[in-house]
Image (cartoon, rainbow, N blue to C red):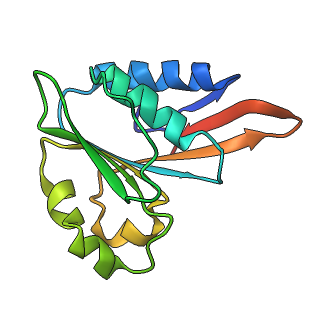
Amino acid sequence: MNANGVKKITASGLATKRYAEGIGKTIKSGRIFALWGDLGSGKTTFVKGLARGLGLNHKIKSPTFVIFHSYPIPKTFFRFYHFDLYRLRSAAELEDLGFPEIIKNRKNIVAIEWPKIAKKFLPANTKHINFTHVKKQPNNRIIESL
């Protein structure tokens, strides 16, 4: 991924995971990913691959009902956070969760699904990634960094 953006089409969930795993392996410092896209567009699958690339051996589950999961990253960064903000209604709820402090910590890797409500907290260097379905090819996804 680069500053000009990258567009990648993956043909399966496994391909999406592998692509994200490759990105995870290149991360050398804290990073925030804002993941945009419809339900079922591949955001959680991407997060699973990203976590694997960071060296996590945990089973990564969608945090839809608990809002976020936190995992220690072996030998390197402080923590990996996976947020799903779909159910939140206000930025005040994010503050109650300690979200601003989490994203300010430069050692953290943070992946945020449904990030609209968090926009005011996101730093300028946040990596925004959009996920869309490919028409007439339901298993294919377009993953585009913005």
Q: Which quadrant of the figure contains the N terminus?
A: top left
Placement of 16 over or under 3, stated as above or below: above
Residue 1 at least partly seen: no
Residue at the (65%, 52%) spot, across then down: 39
Work out whether residue 97 can be spotted.
yes
**Is residue 18 toward the left or the right of residue 73 in the image?**
right
Q: Residue at x 38, y 59 (%)?
A: 67
From this view, report whether residue 124 is shown above or below residue 136.
below
Q: What x and y, as percent, mark residue 49?
A: 44, 26
In the rendered structure, the answer to whether residue 125 lies left or right of residue 36 reads left
- How many labels, in total? 0
Asked if residue 97 lies left or right of residue 106, the reply is: right
Q: Position of residue 114 (x, y in %)?
A: 49, 59
Q: Nearer the viewer, residue 12 or 36?
A: 12
Residue at 43% x, 36% y: name it: 47
Closer to the camera in the image, 43 or 69: 69
Q: Is residue 94 above or below residue 20?
A: below
Relative image position of residue 109 (x, y in whole percent): 25, 41
Q: Residue at x 43, y 40 (%)?
A: 61
